[in-house]
Image: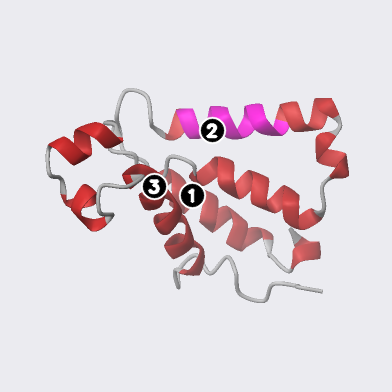
Amino acid sequence: PDRLGIHVDRLQRFILAVRDRMYENPYHNWMHVFDVTRTVYSLAHMSGVLGRLTDWERMGLITATLCHDLEHPGVNNLFLSKSNSALAKMYKDAQVLEKHHSLRAFELMVDEEVDLLRGLNTS
């Protein structure tokens, strides 16, 4: 993280903020996120893929795995659409959960308390 200009304390705040925003449902919960992140990292490492990625690509991989189900309500897109949920209306019934996870991840990265993206080394 340091080579990217991301201080460890900000990365820790980000990870803890993701954990705090995961709902307590039977499958899409913090343990699922942790398992997916650990599994993807392990597979990328054992296969040699991790060593071929740039620092930015590694950061993107880990961020994506951490946030892939951020704030998952425990139901699928079809349920959200058919129940006329607020999320389905917000995202116009198209890729509701995917858009929500992505939006919330970006909002979290720029949140004042997390501040993950401040001072990034873009060179």
Mark 1 is surrounded, within 10 Å at the Cα level, by few (under 14), some (14 to 19) or many (20 or more) other residues, namely few
- Label disc, if present, on residue 87 of the rendered structure: none
Secondary structure of the magenta portion, mostly? Answer: helix
Name the image quarter holding residue 71.
Answer: top left
Asked if residue 120 is positioned above or below residue 21 in the image, the reply reads below
The C terminus - image quarter: bottom right
User: Residues under labels 1 and 2: Cα distance?
Assistant: 11 Å
123 in magenta = no
The amino acid marked with disc number 2 is Phe
Q: Earlier in the sequence, mark 3 or mark 2?
A: 3
The amino acid marked with disc number 3 is Asp
The magenta region covers 32-41
The amino acid marked with disc number 1 is Leu
Q: Earlier in the sequence, mark 1 or mark 2?
A: 1
Q: Position of residue 82 (x, y in %)?
A: 15, 36
- Identify the residue at image location x=15%, y=45%: 85
Mark 3 is surrounded, within 10 Å at the Cα level, by few (under 14), some (14 to 19) or many (20 or more) other residues, namely few
Say what secondary structure mark 3 lies in: helix
Mark 2 is surrounded, within 10 Å at the Cα level, by few (under 14), some (14 to 19) or many (20 or more) other residues, namely some
- Label disc, if present, on residue 20 of the rendered structure: 3
Horizontal relation, residue 30 to residue 23: left or right: right
Q: Mark 3 touching mark 1, by CB under 8 A?
A: yes
Pointer 1: what residue?
Answer: 16
Asked if residue 47 is positioned above or below residue 103 in the image, the reply reads above
Residue sitting nearer the eye, 65 or 119: 65
Pointer 2: what residue?
Answer: 34
Horizontal relation, residue 86 to residue 122: left or right: left
User: Residues under labels 3 and 2: Cα distance?
Assistant: 13 Å
- Identify the residue at image location x=37%, y=48%: 21
Horizontal relation, residue 47 to residue 95: left or right: right
